[in-house]
Amino acid sequence: MMPTGGGEARAQALAELKVLRHETLISQQMEDLLNGAETEFNKLSPWQRANLREARRIVQLSKSVTKGLVEASSLACSRSEQAWRFLRGENNWADFLPLLENVVQLSREEAQQRASHTGLLPYDSLLDLYSPGIDSNFVSRIFNEVKLFLPHLIQEISAHQKNHLTLEQPGPVSTEKQKNLGLVIMNILGFDFNHGRLDVSHHPFCGGVPEDVRITTRYNPTNFIESLMGVIHETGHACYEQGLPKEWHRQPVAKARGMQVHESQSLFFEIFIGRSRSFLKFLQPFLLQYLATQEESAEASSKNSFWNLENLFGAFNKVNPSYIRVNADEVTYPAHIILRFEIERDLIGGKMEVRDLPEVWNEKMQTYLGLSTKGNFKDGCMQDVHWPSGAFGYFPSYSLGALTASQLYASMARTIPDIEAHVQQGQLQSIHQWLRGLIWSQASFLSYEELLVHATGESLNPDHFRKHLISKFLNDSHK
Amino acid sequence: MMPTGGGEARAQALAELKVLRHETLISQQMEDLLNGAETEFNKLSPWQRANLREARRIVQLSKSVTKGLVEASSLACSRSEQAWRFLRGENNWADFLPLLENVVQLSREEAQQRASHTGLLPYDSLLDLYSPGIDSNFVSRIFNEVKLFLPHLIQEISAHQKNHLTLEQPGPVSTEKQKNLGLVIMNILGFDFNHGRLDVSHHPFCGGVPEDVRITTRYNPTNFIESLMGVIHETGHACYEQGLPKEWHRQPVAKARGMQVHESQSLFFEIFIGRSRSFLKFLQPFLLQYLATQEESAEASSKNSFWNLENLFGAFNKVNPSYIRVNADEVTYPAHIILRFEIERDLIGGKMEVRDLPEVWNEKMQTYLGLSTKGNFKDGCMQDVHWPSGAFGYFPSYSLGALTASQLYASMARTIPDIEAHVQQGQLQSIHQWLRGLIWSQASFLSYEELLVHATGESLNPDHFRKHLISKFLNDSHK
């Protein structure tokens, strides 16, 4: 929403706030407070102890970087991100390169400073910022397991879908209609409108504080599925935030348990509710009521109608290797992430230079998805906001989130055997209750590993994801 | 935009930021920096000296209140304002009374603390927060002059307008159309869209920073004049902010010279441009193009058309004693302000208690505007956000601004004799240049008094306002 000319002032303001936060966290007063609390450790409740542990972690994270670096990074990242917004549109790699080099340089420095405090590898110390409890060894191991089955599955599912032609959305649908549908679906998904809003932005996001969660989407008249899926995905993030324990709000322990868990909630909502056959059965009448013309509605059950259930399932679940991560389907998505993980690990580790990025990107796209991005920076290595804004170590959380969501769903389905019937009736209370009890209300009380084992009985296991893909895309017994 | 449930967290966050700001300003480090600058006073440029003076003023203002009071006030005001939003709708004075009493109690305490540092009267120390360089003696003197001519003028103009029936807007106009018109008019008025935006809110405002000025309006389908005038008024504020000297941005001297000057700019745009006969001639084709139907456009010159120029002038300039300040015309507006000034001066001075507010309000409304607000709190003493949010001392700036705007226009008209022709052609560069040179670019370099004398050759003189009203509303020679 910000006009371009406001960028520099915003960058200055953000840097100022980050420095203030930094100074507060590394102050002697903070140290004394934490030490004071630790002398009373025996008197503390388990949640108070977890809160102290998380507070200590935040302070340690602040102490591991210098104030000068915090300020320099914040300014460089704001400026690079703002420039990226128009340079990407121009496919202008040449002008973007020095800005990104500066950001990578500062991120390497940050990784080094952090690593020398934490004893982690430099890249792992950034990974840890977004997904506490995760290191690159773990990520490599998990992603290598995924690489064993994914390329084959992508081919198999693509081949399978070639037999099912999907009809295109018949006509443009106004923003107003899409918005009204989105609001109704948010309500059904359990979004609390007393503590949040839906707005519009260039790219969907979820932000704010648990008491006031703002989600956004964007409206494309010729593709309502994009905005609706944006809404459903962000509502998953929002329900997690709104479900964090109120009695601990604004305390460290009440924060979400890392971005990999956050993405598991948004992807749970998107994939296991939003794109599921059961939910689409429930959704169909809403789509007809809110989006379709009267004529289209009357003929919705016809084989030639876009709105017939089988076609909707196809339209919501097209699998197709493509350039853009945010538009990728759930099957090819991990390939986009694995590529980014391997690149950013090497960039931060100093095994690769920014100038080589387009070439490496192109090679890996060829290998993983059979697509060339030669000369196409816009839809290649310049497509995402993460690196221009200095967020190295963030990408793995998306696919760890997808794997986690699959595992949660498998576990949930054991506890709630008629879960598909609930979804088909739009009765999501049982899902809410399960997630609220085992994930949302737990916030950062447990570690990611403990949380997962407690909720599902095992550590992260990519096989649930594999089984889900096979059952959804290759097993046609549902039809 | 904020959902109700987010209120408490927002209140806490604002209080936290205010305390941080307070602590920074009263720190020894700040004192040392100011003292250091003062030892080099002889080497400073005039603007650097003014900047130091303004910095010293801000620090002194912070030192004159305790941190405990800053926090208590911020929380009480946020909560009272949030409660007011729905209590006003319910006309619920009983539940609002204790909240307002608390706010008044804290404001009295603040006024006392400030007064004991500044040597000003308690109420004057609050007035000084919004309109530096103004005290209640000055305001009383000016307002007494206005009271000498205003009641008579209101009667005379009302009587005069009885002969001119004004036609109502023929049909509803969509938000979309009104917004598009607003954006075009902002552009013509010189709003810089690289450094600002237009959005929607419950009540029009102008906020943000000079590099990113956000203005809002609200859309009423049956009264487009309201949204358009909101846009024009706020564009006046915005141009002042956008015209502040860039080389001093974010320094104390680069702040606007008080709310009375700010309001003089918004009212200059609203009254001397927006509602003027010259501008309406320019505006008419835009109104037809953006808002009227084809039929209405074809008949726009007819005597029975809402869109004929004479009727538009009447519709934009109806004079009518009414309950609500923000809807008041430029003639009766000062009566609303004088009433509020007299009440808040006595409330803060301890000469009046909050429980007596409805009765005193009713009496003064009877005296100044001939209207009773007995039992009607919603449209009486509960109508404005200022007192519920603790902004005592703010109201006078509106009418001081109107008087200042009249004086600026009179002076400008001497320098630019064909100013009406410029306005009629939508050529506002000369006005921009005049205001930019004498007001906007001056920021807080001069005092209010110096600024005014420099721009107009005299101190504030309400006679310009009187002459303007007579010439506009009683002298029909223009027709």
Image: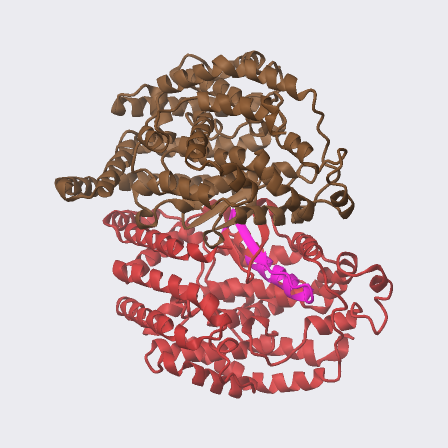
Chain colours: A red, B brown
Residue at 35% of width from left, 51% of height from top? A17
Q: Quadrant of residue A8?
A: bottom left
Q: Is residue A325 above or below residue A438?
A: below
Residue B422: give x, y in percent of width and height: 52, 42
Residue situated in front as seen by the camera: A63 or B193: B193
Q: Is residue B405 left or right of residue B44?
A: right
Q: Is residue A215 magenta?
A: yes
> Would residue B132 appear left or right of A239 to someone viewing this image?
left
Question: Which of A94 and A10 lies nearest the eye of the viewer?
Answer: A94
Q: Is residue B115 left or right of residue A268?
A: left
Q: Judge whether B54 appears above or below A216 on screen.
A: above
Q: Is residue B98 visible?
A: no
The C terminus of chain B sits in image quarter: top right
Residue A52 locus on image (x, y percent): 35, 52
Residue A300 lies, in percent from the top left, at 83, 66
**From which residue to which does the magenta span run?**
A209-237
Towards the viewer: B259 or A476? B259
* Residue B410 seen in render: yes
Measured as percent of width and height from the top left, residue A362 is found at 48, 85
